[in-house]
Image (tube, grey):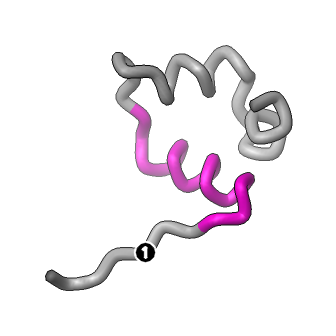
Amino acid sequence: MAKIAGESGLSRETLYRTLSDDGNPRLATLLGVLRAMGLRLSMAAA
């Protein structure tokens, strides 16, 4: 978690709070976390 936090530019505490059940992450935050994990978000028409 510390590595992902550092690579996404967030503190570890912010990352835990954002991804908690009560968290409400912004899209930019989620994209940063995904990028730090080597993942990418994609969408397709249903």
- Which corner quadrant holds the C terminus? bottom left
**x, y percentage for residue 9?**
75, 38
Residue 8 as seen in the image, left or right of residue 27: right
The residue identified by callout 1 is 42
Residue drawn at 59 percent across, 21 percent down: 16
Q: Residue furthest bottom?
A: 45
Residue drawn at 51 percent across, 47 percent down: 30
Q: Is residue 36 above or below residue 1?
A: below
Q: Regarding mark 1 in the picture, which secondary structure is present there?
A: loop
Residue drawn at 73 percent across, 22 percent down: 12
Whether residue 28 appears in magenta in the rendering, the answer is yes
Residue range (magenta): 25-39
**x, y percentage for residue 27?**
43, 49
Amino acid on which the number 1 mark rests in the picture: Ser
Residue 28 as seen in the image, left or right of residue 16: left
Residue 1 lies in quadrant? top right
Query: Considering depth in this image, is 7 or 39 the residue closer to the camera?
Result: 39
Q: Residues within 10 Å of mark 1 (few under 14, many from 20)?
A: few
Residue 8 lies in quadrant? top right
Residue drawn at 76 percent across, 40 percent down: 4
**x, y percentage for residue 14?**
62, 20
Residue 45 as seen in the image, left or right of residue 5: left
Q: Residue furthest left?
A: 46
